[in-house]
Image (cartoon, rainbow, N blue to C red):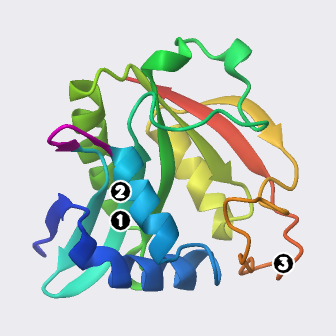
Amino acid sequence: MTDYLIKNLSNEDFAAVIELGNKVHGDGYLDETSISKILNQSTVGSLNASYVMYHDQTLVGFRLSYAPNKWPLDKWCTSDKWPVNKEHVAYFKCNTIHPDYQGKGLGGQLLQTSITTLKEMGAKAGLSHIWMQSPGNASFKYFTKAGGQLIKTHARRWNDDPTIPDYVCILCGNDCHCDASEMMLVF
């Protein structure tokens, strides 16, 4: 069995996380400014809900998660349909696994590690916007298998998103037409 190291995201991981994130999701998905902001939103006191996974010296995956009350609700959040009050909801920004390592259950390991920390932070649930055009719809299948429940599907979720102004979708290019399913995982 292959050994993987899971540890908290830190500044020393930024370059590798940006490279892998942009490879899997498209150019401009992550940059130095955004990953620094994500790390801040992931942290409460000494707790950090974002994790990276290495095999030897190679980054094979990461889970970026925001602590409860450290992320803004936006027009893609349907909080009136959530089964948990918004002050107890964390946000699962993304779970990214290198293509050579997909299908091995590594994403689930990262998710469970993050959930453990989020519970310590007082979260009772986590929200995510699941990429519906992921190859084989793997993102939806993975989050549903973990217990995620569909709240609402949002058309063209990442089109003209001001939080990722230089994003070039890996499927659509500069004019992203990908949909996102707003899903909640109650812990």
Say whether residue 111 is left or right of residue 159: left
By secondary structure, the bulk of the magenta-drawn segment is best described as strand
**x, y percent for residue 61:** 35, 71
Residue located 79% across and 53% down the image:
157
* Marks 2, 1: nearer the viewer: 2
Rate crowding at label 3 as few (under 14), some (14 to 19) or many (20 or more) other CA atoms within 10 Å.
few
Query: Helix, strand or loop at disc 1?
Result: strand
Are the two marked residues, 2 and 3, in contact with CB atoms closer than 8 angstroms?
A: no
Q: Label 2: which residue?
A: 39
Q: Amino acid at mark 3?
A: Cys
Residue located 35% across and 65% down the image:
62
- Mark with earlier residue (2, 1): 2
* Marks 2, 3: nearer the viewer: 2
Asked if residue 99 shows in the view, the reply is no
Q: Label 1: which residue?
A: 62
Q: Amino acid at mark 2?
A: Leu
Mark 2–mark 3 Cα distance, whole angstroms, equals 28 Å
- Mark with earlier residue (1, 3): 1
Mark 2–mark 1 Cα distance, whole angstroms, equals 12 Å
Q: Which residues are magenta?
A: 43-47
Rate crowding at label 1 as few (under 14), some (14 to 19) or many (20 or more) other CA atoms within 10 Å.
many
Q: Label 3: which residue?
A: 172
